[in-house]
Amino acid sequence: MTQSVAVWLLIALALLSANLPFLSEKVFAMLPYRRRGRADAKPFWLRLIEVLASYLIVGAVGFAFESSLGNRFSQGWQFYAITLCLYLVMAYPGFVYRYLYRRASRRS
């Protein structure tokens, strides 16, 4: 795999995994969320945990790509703060769809 393919694959994976918690009512898109034995809508805190967990998974995939393509570089806390902010920006379309767009379209 070339470096440019790995970068585009990682960006596509990050965009998909950042928005998935807001587009699916299942926990990690696999397990149904149940409250008191009934299927229920996921709360925001659970969606946030899913976004953070998927950030860690995408980061691990990125490190695997970097290691397979050459030397892995050590990063400081600034790198992780910036990439987390970029990941949250990637999650914004799913957030808008879940909490802003759907409610506005129901009112009209």
Image: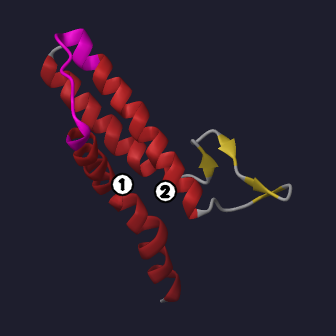
Q: Give the number of callouts.
A: 2
Circle 2: element type: helix
Q: Nearer the viewer, residue 11 or 86?
A: 86
CA gap, disc 2 and disc 1: 8 Å
Residue 10 part of the magenta segment: no
Q: Amino acid at mark 2?
A: Phe
Q: Can residue 1 be seen from the camera position used here?
A: no
Q: Quadrant of the N terminus?
A: top left
Q: Is residue 85 left or right of residue 16?
A: left
Q: Where 95 falls versus 24 (above or below)? A: below
Looking at this view, name the residue that lies furthest to the right: 37
Q: Residue at x 21, y 39 (%)?
A: 79
Q: Nearer the viewer, residue 53 or 39?
A: 53
Where is residue 70, by image quadrant?
Answer: top left
Where is residue 61, by image quadrant?
Answer: top left
Percent position (x, y) of residue 73?
Answer: 18, 21
Bin the neighbour count of mark 2 within 10 Å (Cα to Cα): few under 14, some 14-19, many 20 and up.
many
Residue for badge 2: 22
Circle 1: element type: loop
The answer to whether mark 2 and mark 1 are in CB contact below 8 A is: yes
- The part of the chain drawn in magenta is 65-78
Residue for badge 1: 91
Percent position (x, y) of residue 14?
Answer: 33, 40
Question: Could you tell which of marks 2 and 1 lies nearer the N-terminus?
Answer: 2
Q: Amino acid at mark 1?
A: Ala
